[in-house]
Image (cartoon, helix red, strand yellow):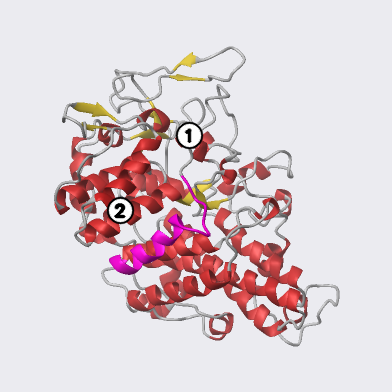
Amino acid sequence: MKKIFIAAALLASLFSCRKSELELQNPSTYDFETYFRSSEAINQATVATYATLMHQGLWAREYYFIFDLLGYDAKKTSNMQGDMAQLAEYNFGPEQVQLTQLWQSLYRIIFRANVVEDRAIAWNPTLDADKLKVAQYVAEAKFLRAYAYFNLVSLWGGVPLHKTYNETINNNYLPRATAADVWAFVEKDLKDAQAVLPVVYGNADLGRATKGAATALLGRVYLFQQKWGPAQAELVKLTQAPYTYALEKDYNANFTPTNQNTKENIFQAMNAAWTDWGLGSQYYMFGGAESQPSAGGKVTHSGRAQEYGFNDWDNMYVSTAAVNAFTYPNPVGGAPYTDPRAKFTFYGSAASGGATVYCEQCTGGAINFPFNAADQQGYYKWKKYEYYDRVKSYGAPISSINGQIIRFADVLLMLAETHIQQGDVGDAPRQYIDSVRSRSGAELYTTLGDKTNAMNLLMRERQLELCGEQQRYFDLIRWGIAKQTLNAIRKAEPGDGKEPFLDKHVLFPIPNAEKNYNPNVLAGVQGEWN
């Protein structure tokens, strides 16, 4: 996956504008009708579709800010300024830059995936080897298209449904499809991808979507629609042959530069450390320069370690509400108990359970974390996705730590939820939950209680296990408890005291950029929001 994205520039040049048929054509330029006549050319278009995961609004930068803030795993420090700070206060509207970028990049994935499928059909290779390769590339494109639409329908509800390249080219003013139609299209894409994708790849192709990734995302899609039986049927496949997924013995191994090789990884946003790929390219995620020549085509790193880092740009606290969630009644006896995953998630005080030293691998030895008990905001800082075990200060937004999109612990917790939601609160869901807990040495449950209690335990388990992984907001929305939960914890949060979540926030506002462009979308927007 860490390749020069030739096709990204190609696709941008082909579709940035419409040229008159009367204009002279340079015979040395790429041509849409003739270029994609080899499996390598189709592969380039597929890789370019993956590359969009690193575009603005997505995994190089904005995605983790958006959902850590909105789900209140994180809260802003005084260093965070401007439009990003609006997200932290739910003070955003249809002009919000990051949400517009998210919308646009998700549709860029869809457009590029449609090009892959369209050009594969147009070429129609005759050699068996080419047929196999192209079938895989189309399946990967369908997976990525499904991932994009999964985000769009979860966050905005009904959205324009661009199923094919020709449909987009011939009518780029599609009205919004119903949410049900979008969900159905996502399911079909994932089933098609699941039937073709391989179980594993060689090391050179790590990061490509696998059959397991399609299965996991399909299970998640069913779960979000409350189709508990189908969700369970898909997710349980991942616990059986031919799959070999398992929990990493070391929880922290999932958030290090080598996490692409863990047995827990199902699908990730792939990152690579920046070295010297062109003047200024280490800052590509701040200006939308993903396809600029100065970036050298290698724009795969993330800014999270630098931007969240307490010894670096320090834009984010871990919210006190998230920290407090790690202390709860012990499953054995009910006494106050601090979950051992706290020390892997954040730096803080000894009483909080957070890590209290850093720089363990530095030349000068470990350093005490400078917890500031007098800080009125609660001085808890992120350890997840950071490098502070090996460096005192990181110094640049060039992290190579891959972003976790789906990992096996998430699958096990989703499986537990499918059982509980269907009224099974016995050994099966308890064992799924306990397997996740036991990895970090947490006390195990002997019973989950009734359905209400079991769901409460499951909700907390997802909050702790997946803290800072951009899952909390999606969970609160799909459970229908976002308003009551977020307003309650925000009201109690030191330095906050607000109740910012309004009923309209259950869906994102349709971006002004889309409304201004597409009159058919504008016509269906209610109250200038959604």
Q: Residues within 10 Å of mark 1 (few under 14, many from 20)?
A: few
Q: What is the secondary structure assignment of the residue under circle 1?
A: loop
- Which residue carries the number 1 mark? 250
Task: Quickly name the residue at label 2.
Answer: 416
Task: Tell whether 339 sits left or right of 15.
Answer: left
**Is 221 drawn above or below residue 282 in the view shown?**
below
Q: Residue at x 40, y 56 (%)?
A: 96
* Secondary structure at numbered mark 2: helix
Q: In the displayed structure, would residue 336 be above or below residue 142?
A: above
Query: Which residue appears at 44% of the width and 68% of the height?
Result: 149
Residue 253 visible in this rendered orientation of the protein: yes
Quadrant in the picture for the N terminus:
bottom right
- State which quarter of the image contains the C terminus: bottom left
Q: Residue furthest top?
A: 364
20 lies left or right of 332: right
Amino acid residing under circle 1:
Asp
Q: Nearer the viewer, residue 178 or 469?
A: 469
Indicate the position of residue 231 as horizontal and vertical percent values. Answer: 35, 65
* Nearer to me, 78 or 277: 277
Magenta segment range?
225-246
x and y, in percent, of residue 313 in the image: 50, 31
Tell me which residue sits at (67%, 78%) in the image: 120
